[in-house]
Every structure is written in structure tokens, then in C-alpha cells.
Amino acid sequence: MATAPRFWRENPSRYNLVGIRCNSCGRYFFPRRAICPICHRKSVGKIEEVKLKGTGKIFSFTEVHDTLEELVLQKPYVVAMVEFDEGPKVTGQVIDCEASELQIGTPVRVTMRKLSEEGPSGIIHYGYKFVPVKEKAP
């Protein structure tokens, strides 16, 4: 029996930000893994799947000016390392803003967007990107 490709097996975690919490050390990780990279064997049987909130702050970022052919219409664009509220750091594109509007510590949230398409009638791949959290007016 053939196994589904990894891309399809990981869709639930990719579209829902499913990570893990190690109940041995209490740390969160994304993407999911079978064993805690901190506790190692102590974590066996103590891993819990969790859906991350998808909110955090920019830990580091850069503006990309030279890119792959399929991203040429998006340039320049911002890529950031975001530290989720639960602790894991994840890299992703920051959209709906200019690089000049961002700084270390800017709050962001996850949004699901189209990443690519396999031809005009092919499969559309979705994934996460980040958008700045606009402060609410008092």
C-alpha cells in the first residue's frame, strides 16, 4: 500500500498551525515532531498535539529585493522570524505592510494565503503568512 506524500500528510498541521507541547519540559514546538528536541527520551509518551494561537511578535526580519522567478511580482517583500506567544520561532512572509512600518517586537498574527499554483488548472497550495496586528483605537 502506497503512503501519501509528506505534503498531504502534513496538511492539517500546515493549515491549522498544529504543534506539540512536551509535558516533560513544558515547551512548545512547531512543526510537530515525535520527540522533544530538549528532553529527548524523557518526552516519549508525553507529547501532546496543540493548536497554536497564531499570534506573536517579530523577532527579526529582512526585506527581500532579489527573488525566485515565481515571486518576482511580489518583490520587494518582507520575511520575518516570528516568535509565537507559546514560544516557537517560525519564519514566514509578512504581508499587507511596508518594511518601514515594521520593527523588532511588532505584533503579528497568522493568516492563510495562497502560496503557489501548479499551472492554470493545477493544485493550489495554501500556507501561512503574517500580518501586523493593528492597534485598536480607544
Image: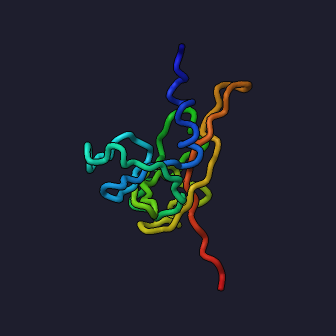
**Camera-nearest residue between 73 and 102:** 102
**Camera-nearest residue between 55 and 81:** 55
Instruction: Kindly identify the residue that appears in the image at 56 percent across and 64 percent down.
Output: 132
In this image, 44 relative to 72: left or right? left
**Camera-nearest residue between 61 and 10:** 10
Q: Quadrant of the C terminus?
A: bottom right
Looking at the rendering, which quadrant does residue 72 occupy? top right
Estimate the x, y position of residue 21 in percent, counting from the top left. Answer: 41, 53
Instruction: Kindly identify the residue that appears in the image at 49 percent across and 65 percent down.
Output: 102
What count of labels does the image hold? 0
**Camera-nearest residue between 30 and 70:** 30
Q: Residue lying farthest top? A: 1
Estimate the x, y position of residue 24 in percent, counting from the top left. Answer: 31, 55
Q: Residue lying farthest bottom? A: 138
Compared to 107, does 72 lie above or below? above
Instruction: Kindly identify the residue that appears in the image at 59 percent across and 44 percent down.
Output: 15
Q: Quadrant of the N terminus?
A: top right
Q: Residue lying farthest front? A: 45
Estimate the x, y position of residue 30 in percent, counting from the top left. Answer: 43, 48
Colour mapping used in the image:
rainbow
